[in-house]
Image (tube, helix red, strand yellow):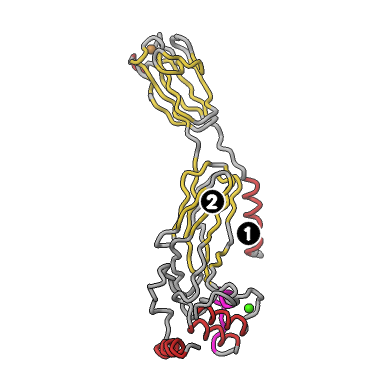
Amino acid sequence: MKMPSPNQVRCSLLTLSLVLYPYVAPATTVQVHVGQGATLTFTPDTVSIQPGDMVEWIWDDNGHSVTSGTPGNPDGTFDSGLQGIPFTFSHTFPMAGSFPYYCIRHQAMMVGTVNVEAPTVSIGGTVLYCSNPVPGPVPNVTLTLTGSASGSTLSDASGNYTFLSLASGGNYTVTPTKAARVPGSPNIHTVDVIATQRHFLNLGTPLAGCRLTAADVNGDTSVNTVDVIAIQRFFLGLSTGIANTGRYKFTPVNRTYIGLVTNQTAQNYDTLVYGDTAATFVELPDDPSQDAADDGTSAGEVAAVTKTRKTGL
Ligand SMILES: [Ca+2]
Ligand SMILES: [Cu+2]
């Protein structure tokens, strides 16, 4: 039997998700006993439900009521009147809120509460440099939430972010951004210039994946001397003629959720910095004073960087 291709699987999963969404939780009914065991109680005295759910009160004893409001202050939303067994009374709660009720005969001695809580969902994931062999976290990325709710959060030191308590069923878009690195700031230097130039000259292992994307700083889909010069100018601290060098690129650009009813985890973003093309991507410190001695640079290359700086290439 022929196995479905990954594209076919993806396609059928997409179709399935379109069928399932938007999803509305089926209304449920919660039961509360009135005067159970001949006590002056509603059992349980507090229930939590979702909007659209129903509470059904079951009389276990005579001479009680279920009356909305607080003792002495009926609010008129619902009222069973004084009843005896056998009797049931029900009320549907369409809106979120906290709804107290009491027995008009026993007043403050016999009270209960219905809490109606709108369901919430969360969106979370990790922002990672799409490097190899181990993707490093990207801290301090601003993730902006738009749609049924708005807000923003920063990725933490591990690159993680979470939006909590989003109204279930809403439409949301999350977009990551991070300010471009300042020309001359660490981690984009001669090693990157050389790596880009070697790719252009077909020397050694060609750049691939994110590093290749990062090398094409002017976005014309080819890596050539224009890119090499732009990265070099960035390294020299120039702010013009650097194309996109130092800018962050996130993949995907954003993520959109329609009718979100389940918690979303692993909503990750691959990250690259244009011009950061050297063999090993590094976590780029936000503080330019923290010049990282990294990039897997050989001693010879470090010497070359130093020499280049001194001669003002
Ligand atoms: Ca280019
Ligand atoms: Cu009562």
Q: Which residues are magenta?
A: 204-215
The quarter of the displayed image where residue 139 is located? bottom left
Lower position in the chain sequence, tag 1 or tag 2: 1
State left or right for residue 120 relative to residue 60: right
Q: Amino acid at mark 1?
A: Arg
Q: Residue 248: horizontal and vertical position, in percent?
A: 53, 67
Nearer to the camera, 25 or 9? 25
207 and 45: which one is in front? 207
User: What residue is shown with label 1?
Assistant: 10
- SS under mark 1: helix
- The verdict on residue 205 being magenta is yes
Q: How many marks?
A: 2
Q: Is residue 93 above or below residue 25?
A: above
Crowdedness of circle 1 by 10 Å Cα count: few (<14), some, many (20+)?
few
Rendered location of residue 145, percent (x, y): 54, 51
* Residue 256 in picture, x, y percent from top left: 59, 53
Q: Which residue is mark 2?
A: 145
**Amino acid type indicated by mark 2:** Leu
Horizontal placement of 256 versus 281: left or right?
Answer: right
Circle 2 crowding by C-alpha within 10 Å: few under 14, some 14–19, many from 20: many
State which quarter of the image contains the N terminus. Answer: bottom right
Please name which of the two marks, 1 or 2, marks the residue nearer to the observer: 2
